[in-house]
Image: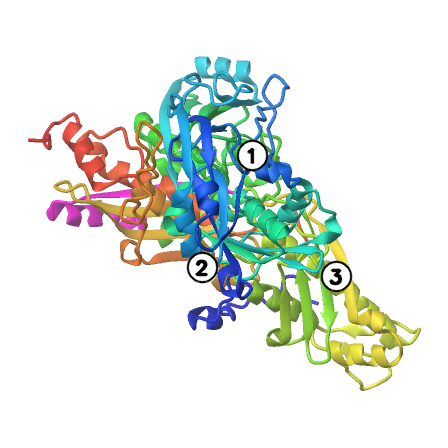
Amino acid sequence: MNAFGKSQPVTRREDARFLTGRGRYTADIAPAGALAAAFVRAPVAHGDIASLDLEAARGMPGVVLAMAAADAEAAGATLGMGFTVTSNSDGSKGAAPERPFLARGRVRFVGEPLAVIVAETREQALDAVEAATVEIDERPVHMDLAPGGPALHAEAPDNVGYDFGLGDRAATQAALEAAAHRVTLRVVDNRIASNPMETRACWAEMEGDRLHVCYGGQGVWSLKGELVSLLGLDESRVRVTTPDVGGGFGTKAMNYPEYFCVALAALRLGRPVAWMADRGEGMLTDNAGRDLVSEVELGFDADHRITAYRVDTLNNLGAYNSNFGQLIQSHLFSRVLTGTYDIRTAWMRSRGIYTNTTQTDAYRGAGRPEAIFALERIMDRAARVLGVDPWELRRKNFIAEAAFPYRTVADETYDVGAFGRVLDRAEAASGRAGFAARRRESAARGRLRGLGLSYYIESILGAPSEGVTIEFLEEGARIYVGTQSNGQGHETVFAQFLADQTGIPADRIEVVQGDSDRIASGGGTGGSRSVTVQGNATLKVAREAIAALGAFLSDGGAPAAFDGERFRMDGTNEAPTVLEAVARAREAGRADLARVAGEARLPARSFPNGAHVAEVEVDPETGEIRVERYTVVDDFGNLINPLLAEGQVHGGIAQGLGQVLWEQIAHDADGQLLSASFMDYAMPRASDLPFIGFGTEPVPSTANALGMKGCGEAGTVGAMAALVNAVEDALWDRGVRDLSPPLTPARVWKALGEADDGRFAAQ
C-alpha cells in the first residue's frame, strides 16, 4: 500500500453542491416550526444591573419564554462556562473569574447577553427584546491595553489575567548587555473579526427524552461535554451534530452563551428553538482575534549572529476568559518563539489584560502568526539597522540542516528542516533579481516600490490522537472521522486518501463527520491538525483492515498480498478487490471484517515552514498600497492533495493581508463598537489581491508515518510580516519608521507627511 497516497490535485467534490445552493448549513436544516430565539444584550460596556424587567416582553404576541440568569438557575442550569487558564511565571494559575452564559449582577462588555426571548417567529422575538427594560448603573470602563484601571473582576484587581514567562530572563538580559548590536521594535497586532460567510447559528430539539443540539462549529464533543455539565444532563441524553459549516477560522471552535440558552429553552419548552446571528450581532459577540502589543529586542554579535531574543507582550483578553484565551499569546505563541533561527538564549513574558470588550481567542494560526510577525518584523528592522541584506541575515542565522532534530529554547523539537533550500527556491520564484528594475520603473511613475520577506515556521497543535471507523459496504465504503470540515475540503481529501489505501473509488466513499451519536469521540478541527492526525489514524486502521482481509483470504496460509488495487493470492489467478474480499467474508460469517475501528496518536508535532515574498507599490500622494506580486514556497512535507493545500494557503494569505491592510475592530472610549457592519469594517476583496505564486519544497516530517506537516493556517502565519516588511521597504528612504496595521491609505499618507524629510507634510 502507498502510505503517502498518490498526491493527486483532485478538485473538491463538495463544491458541486456548495456552488449550486445545495449546501446544508445549520439554518437550512432547522426543524419545521422551530421557535425563534433573540437576545436582550447589554447596552453599555460596564455596570451593575439595577433592574431587568421582562414582564412586558412576556406579554408580547407570540412570546413563549423570556429567561434571565435567575430563571436559568431556577431551571437547574449552572451558569459558569468553561475555559482553560495558563500558569503564571511564579507557578500560580491565571485568574479564573466566572463567565456566566447570562449576565448575573454585572455586565462587562457591550452585547453581553442578559436574557433570551423565545417566540413563534424571529420578528416577534426581536419585538419582544425591544419591550424588555434594563437599568444599569454604569461603572468606569477599562479599555487600555495595560495593567491597572477600573477592575473588571475581584480575582484580577489590576486587570491582569495571567503573567506568563518562558526562558531564562537573567541570561537573556546579560546576553543583550554584552551584545555588539541591540535592536528594539514595538510590534502591534490589531484586533480583527473572522467574519465567516455563515454567521454563528444553532438550534435544539427534543428527541424523546434526549436533547439534540445542532450548531455550526469545529467539533461536536466540546459542546456536548459542556451541555452535560451546565444543564445537568446525563451524557447519554445529549446529542450534538454539525452539518456543513460556512467558515470557522478558530472562531467557531469555542462554545458561546447562545448555545446553552437555546438548548435550555428547548429543554424547558419541549419544542425546537433556533437562533442565527445577523452580521452585526456576530461582529458584536464573536470572539475577536489578535489584539496585542509586543516589545521585542534582538542582540547580535559582531558577525551579526543572534545572541539573545526578548519579547514582552500585553494581550487583550476582553472581558472574560474565552475557552483558550489565556493560552493563545502565552503557550501557543511560545511554540514558535524563536522561529527558524538558532537562538539559544531567550526570554518571553506575556500578560493578559481584561478590558471591557468582547473576548479574544483563536483566529487562524492562534498565537503562531503573532509570534512570527514579531520575530520577522524585528529581523527585517535589524537588517536595516545593521546595514545588511535581510535575506542574508536570515540565512546566517537559520538552524543548520545538520542540527536536526533541534530542540528550541521553548522545549520544542523541530524534527527536520531545510530552510536555506526553501529560501533559495523562493528567491528565484519571486524574481528578486529583477526587483531593482521594477523599482526604477515604479519610481518613474511617481510610485514607491518595496519588497518584503518573511520566513515562518508553524507548530501543528490540537489533540494528537484521533479515531476512525471504516465501514465496507456492498458498493463502496463509509469513513467516520473525528475532525470537522469548515470548508477545507475534508470530504474530498479523506475519501481520496482512503481510496489510495484500499483501491475503492473515491466517489464511492462517504465521509461521515459531526455527529456525537455516530462517532464516539474526536478532536475536531483546529491547529492545522485535521488531515495529518486523521490521515495517520486512517492509515493505521486501513492497514489493519487490509491485513485482516489478507489473512482471511489465505485460509490459514501466507496472507494474501495487496498491491493497492487487488489482493494477490499464491497458487491462484484470483485477484479480488477489497470489496470482493469483504463480500466473501460476509458469506463466510465474518461480518466483523466489514467494519473496523481504531485510534492513532502522533508521536510528535510537525513544523511546516516556508518563505513569503510580497512586493508592493505605494502611491505617496494618497497613501494607497497595491500588492503587485506575491510568492510563497512552503515545506509541508508530503501532500495528499496539492490543489487543496494551495487553496488553503491562498485563503490564509488573504486573511493575513486583510489584517495588515484594512481590517480593524474599533471601539470608542466608552466601549461601544464602532465597526459593526461591512460599512465600517473593511474586508479584502478579490480585486485587492494579486495572483499568488505557490510552490512547495517538501522535506517529509519524521514525526508521523505520513511525512506530513499540515497546511491550514500557514498562509496567515507567514503573510503578515511579509507585507509590512514590503511596505516598510517602500517607505524607508522617505523616513517612515513606525508602521502599525492596518496600513490604511490615511495612515500611510500621514506617516509620509510626518517623515523626517517633510516633503509630504500635510498642508
Say which amino acid is labelled 3: Val
Q: Among all residues in the image, which is located at the extreme bottom?
A: 573
Compared with residue 252, is residue 414 higher up or lower down, i.e. above or below? above
Mark 1 or 2, closer to the camera: 1
Say which amino acid is labelled 1: Pro
Task: Identify the mark nearer the N-term, 3 or 2.
Answer: 3
The local secondary structure at tag 1 comes to loop
Mark 3 or 1, closer to the camera: 1
Q: Rounded to the nearest whole Å, what is the CA distance between mark 3 and mark 2?
A: 28 Å
Q: Is residue 645 magenta?
A: no
Q: Residue at x 60, y 53 (%)?
A: 269
The residue identified by callout 3 is 541
Query: In x, y percent, where is residue 18?
Result: 46, 68
The residue identified by callout 2 is 647
Judging from the image, the colouring scheme is rainbow
Estimate how packed mark 2 is, as few (under 14), some (14 to 19) or many (20 or more) residues with alpha carbons within 10 Å. some
Query: In x, y percent, where is residue 182?
Result: 39, 19
Q: Is residue 498 left or right of residue 619?
A: right
Q: Decide: marks 1, 2 in contact (CB < 8 A)?
A: no
The local secondary structure at tag 2 comes to helix
Q: Decide: marks 3, 1 in contact (CB < 8 A)?
A: no
Task: Identify the mark nearer the N-term, 3 or 1.
Answer: 1
Task: Identify the mark nearer the N-term, 1 or 2.
Answer: 1
Residue interval drawn in magenta: 430-458
The residue identified by callout 1 is 100
Estimate how packed mark 1 is, as few (under 14), some (14 to 19) or many (20 or more) residues with alpha carbons within 10 Å. some
Regarding residue 249, the answer to whether it shows in the image is yes
Say which amino acid is labelled 2: Gly
